[in-house]
Amino acid sequence: MANRLSAMEQAVRLLSSRSHFRMEIERKLALRGYEEEEIERTSRRLVELRYLDDERTARELAAVRLRRGPLGARRLKADLVARGAGQDLADEVVSEVVPRDDSELAAEAARAWRGRGGRPALARYLERRGFSGRGILRALETLPAGGESTTPGSDET
């Protein structure tokens, strides 16, 4: 195919839309049929040029995810690892941005919750958001006596 982009051109095109983890770029190039050697060469060069920086990307992604609403450490770590951050990097970034005691964040999420179903549904929602058991219990304690959210809506994450 004469008009095919080089792996470097394709990677830069991908990076122009958003930051990627090194693993993401390598996987996307492989899916597009580039040879392993060319992918590795491209990946190394992108790191040298600082176009690929897993630490920076992890911090950016964590900030974006937290701007959307409070998350617990488990959920944020899982999101980072799923996208391509290594476990150690995900642990480091999450420990810097999510307090060890996530009770206040869980309470904030509970106050913003728009679901129905009372305490059990809220507990499931907070669990899906990755909050600790301690944070969930403390958030449930902040609910009004009826246990229902004051603003009904959907229970989606």
Image (cartoon, rainbow, N blue to C red):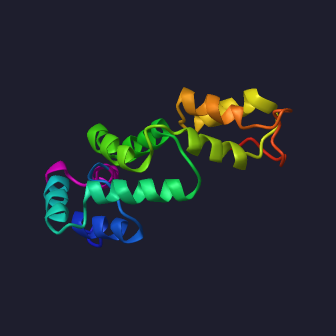
48 or 57, nearer to the observer = 57
Residue 87: x and y in percent read 30, 38
Q: Specify the principal SS of the magenta part.
A: helix
Q: Is residue 79 visible?
A: yes
Drawn side of residue 1 relative to residue 150, left or right: left
Look at 80% across and 32% down and name the residue there: 118
Q: Is residue 157 visible?
A: no
Drawn side of residue 118 relative to residue 69, left or right: right
- The quarter holding residue 68 reads bottom right
Task: Tell me if residue 27 comes above or below residue 124 in the rendering.
Answer: below
Tell me the quadrant of the picture where the C terminus can be found: top right
Task: Tell me if residue 21 comes above or below residue 103 in the rendering.
Answer: below
117 or 82, nearer to the observer = 117
Tell me how many marks there are.
0
Look at 60% across and 40% down and name the residue there: 106
* 29 magenta-colored: yes
Look at 83% across and 49% down and name the residue there: 151
Residue 141: x and y in percent read 70, 32
47 or 130, nearer to the observer = 130
Specify the segment rendered in magenta.
24-37
138 or 119, nearer to the observer = 138
Residue 144: x and y in percent read 81, 37
- The quarter holding residue 53 reads bottom left
* 16 magenta-colored: no
Tell me the quadrant of the picture where the N terminus can be found: bottom left
Task: Tell me if residue 13 comes above or below residue 39 in the rendering.
Answer: below
Task: Tell me if residue 42 comes above or below residue 26 in the rendering.
Answer: below
Residue 35: x and y in percent read 20, 52
